[in-house]
Amino acid sequence: MNRPFSEPGWSDAPKSQQQEIWVRHVQGLYQILGKLRSKHPDVIFESCSGGGGRVDLGILLRTDQVWTSDNTDAFDCLKIQEGFSYAYAPKIIRFES
């Protein structure tokens, strides 16, 4: 989900639809997660905030926990997770174990 497209656009699509690749990519991810969740209801699914504490609100409907950052330094995590908790429920934060 976090990997950016190296060449954005969809040259095979009509000009009016070429920038839909971003939306369709996320919709495809949602569909895959929906199928996985229905087949495996007891699996805990995680997502990544993409750095900077950003979370796709739609992904929260489909995942159980979110990594708030790739930074796993204990002191940094305290600050990151505190800031994240101002906008999101603490129960979705994936804590280091």
Image (cartoon, helix red, strand yellow):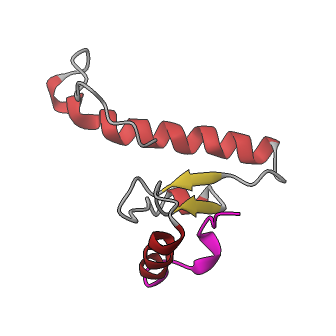
- State the residue lying farthest toward the bottom: 86
Occupied quadrant, residue 14: top left
Residue in the image at 40% along x and 65% along y: 53
Residue 25 placement (x, y as % from top left)? 41, 36
Q: Is 88 a magenta residue?
A: yes
Residue in the image at 81% along x and 45% along y: 40
- State the residue lying farthest toward the left: 15
Residue 28 located left or right of residue 83: right
Residue 29 placement (x, y as % from top left)? 52, 40
Q: Is 70 in front, or is 6?
A: 70
Dominant secondary structure (helix, strand or loop) of the stretch shown in magenta: loop
In the displayed structure, 30 sits above or below 75; it is above
Query: In which quadrant of the rendered image does the C terminus lie?
Result: bottom right
Q: Is 20 in front, or is 46?
A: 46
In the displayed structure, 12 sits above or below 4; it is above
Q: Is 14 a magenta residue?
A: no
In the displayed structure, 18 sits above or below 26; it is above
Q: Which residues are magenta?
A: 85-97
Q: How many marks?
A: 0
Residue 81 located left or right of residue 13: right
Occupied quadrant, residue 36: top right
Residue 43 placement (x, y as % from top left)? 79, 50
Occupied quadrant, residue 39: top right
Residue in the image at 66% along x and 61% along y: 64
Residue 24 placement (x, y as % from top left)? 39, 36
- State the residue lying farthest toward the top: 12
